[in-house]
Amino acid sequence: MPEQHTAEDRTDPRQEVAAFLRERREQIAQRWADAAVFRTVFTVSRDEAVEAGRAVVEALAAVAASGRIEDLEADGFAVVREQLARTAHARARAGATTGQISAEMEALRPPVTELLLDELSGAPADHVRECTTVLAVLMGTLRLVMLETTTVAGQDLINRQRLEMLEIATPVIKLWEGIVAVPLIGTLDSARSQVVMETLLDAIVEQHARIAILDITGVPTVDSLVAQHLMKTVAAARLMGAECIVSGIRPAIAQTIVHLGIDLSSILTRASLADALAYALQQQGAHIVPSSGPVVEPR
Amino acid sequence: MTGEAAPPPDGYVPVLRLGGILLVTLQGDLYDSTAERLRQDIGRTVSDDAVTGVVIDLSGVEIVDSFMGRVLSDIAAMTRLLAAQTVVAGMRPAVAITLVELGLTLPGLRTALSTEEAMNLLGAEVANLPRTAGARRERP
Amino acid sequence: MTHTESVSARLPLTSDLDLVRARQHVRQMTAELGFSLVEQTKLVTAASELARNALVHGGGGRMECAEVTDGGVRGLRLVFSDDGPGIADLDQALSDGYTSGEGLGMGLPGARRLVHEFSVDSARGRGTTVTVTSWVARPPRPREGS
């Protein structure tokens, strides 16, 4: 086998395959249009499926020509990545499993191999073997790119849903004119703490709230990371001109905080949400009195 | 939100005098030299005149980095020495979050949600001021 | 695997005006890439810190911006480099409160907290190169240490 080849050298199996793909583009695209992965996605017109197949063949030719046949990040794939992602997404929505999508991609290989063997009839056996190996590797890489986009699409969906859930789980309640509260329920991780901070600060601006209450009655544990996030939220609110109160620190959590050596002394705390609200109202110049007493107008 | 025109190189920061209070409205992206000059200007004005308070309106500012943060705390510390109070008003949430992540909580700085509240905080009789002074400048 | 698309801009950092330009360029790119407002602000602020470092301590330098992708996630990579005296003790320069001149000593460690990935290459007499990357819509992960 020759040691090194130049880009134009047709004896280099990769260049040979690249040239073959370019020359037989139409034929390959026509055959692929009937394969499940294209047929089931481009249901409206066969021309669309052929067009999609053409784009993939061109991408493969570019990758083969660049010699990076095993590289998922090869530039040639960039062009069709979005198309593959759409296809993968459509197949997944139709209920195809990752395994099925993989099998469907694998099914694209035999028709091309057949054409390649036709093309190379009469060539030395060694060369034929090298070229078919290159094609097999290339098609394998294409399959991996497809599967990668499948998982990425799935991951994107999960991430988006996670963010949406985070937002739903973080309601901001206006308790009084200029007083907002966020009752936190469930585990506070870093991502959620970030959403809490942003949601609360936005509410401070929207509601023109001078006082914000973070109620952690429903939070089972507070570790140093969560405590750090609480302190950051309080500090950011202060920079904006609002005062932030943390309420509902249960005895067990107070113990943990002391045990971890976290200094929350810079944070204004109250035992319960009710205490925090009473304090906030007082700050606003309103007072709670028994109904028999004089009526106090809220500010 | 983006593409705010750069201030001219000799960036001009409007400083409004309302009774004993200086209202400074910062806008867009400031040059370091502009911020530096502002610090000097405020120092000079506060020492010359009978100024008792300085309100710095940040509602039009999209970014405060450590340099700008230092200028703000310097102004606060300087005016305090000159027996005047500085209040920073209207900082945006994204700016506040970023400053805290940066490690700058600016503990010596007094803050308010809006210029109007900053005025109240400084005990200014907003009612006695021209009607437009507090509210109009709040959201330029 | 991270894949660099292309260097989209190379901006000089030699004056006050360049700092403003660098900030505005990063703002525009992060907005186009779909960064959230908070993430935009963080990256622009980090860029401001690092650009000023290159200008003040490195005697001027340049900023390179490149869009990057990792799987399907897009991001922005910024490289700040100068030919200044370099940093003799990187650990010290990266610890909070350290300052080699003006400022609050927040430059490097502060910028590091504002981005997802951060690396410094420097030695005395070799200049300094700081590379930072942030990703779009990747939910924040717990950070180890600071």
Image: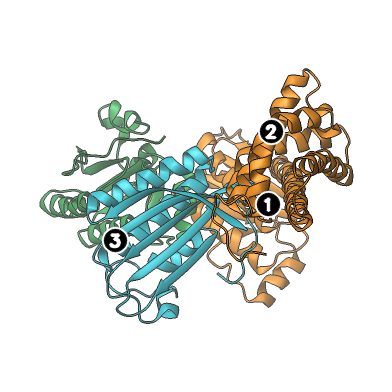
Chain colours: A orange, B green, C cyan
The picture places residue A168, in percent across and down from the top left corner, at 72, 40
The picture places residue A296, in percent across and down from the top left corner, at 58, 35
Left or right position of A140 against B12 = right
Disc 2 to disc 3, C-alpha distance:
49 Å
> In front: A111, or A220?
A111
Q: Is residue A31 visible?
A: yes
| 2 or 3: mark nearer the eye | 2
**The disc numbered 2 marks a residue on which chain?**
A
Residue drawn at (14%, 49%) of the image = B45
In the displayed structure, would residue C55 be above or below residue A55?
A: below
Q: Quadrant of residue A21?
A: top right
Residue A215 is labelled as 1
Q: How many neighbours does mark 1 have within 10 angstroms: few (below 14), some (14-19), or many (20 or more)?
A: many
Residue C61 is labelled as 3
Amino acid found under the numbered disc labelled 1 = Asp
Residue drawn at (68%, 41%) of the image = A20
Q: Quadrant of residue B12?
A: top left
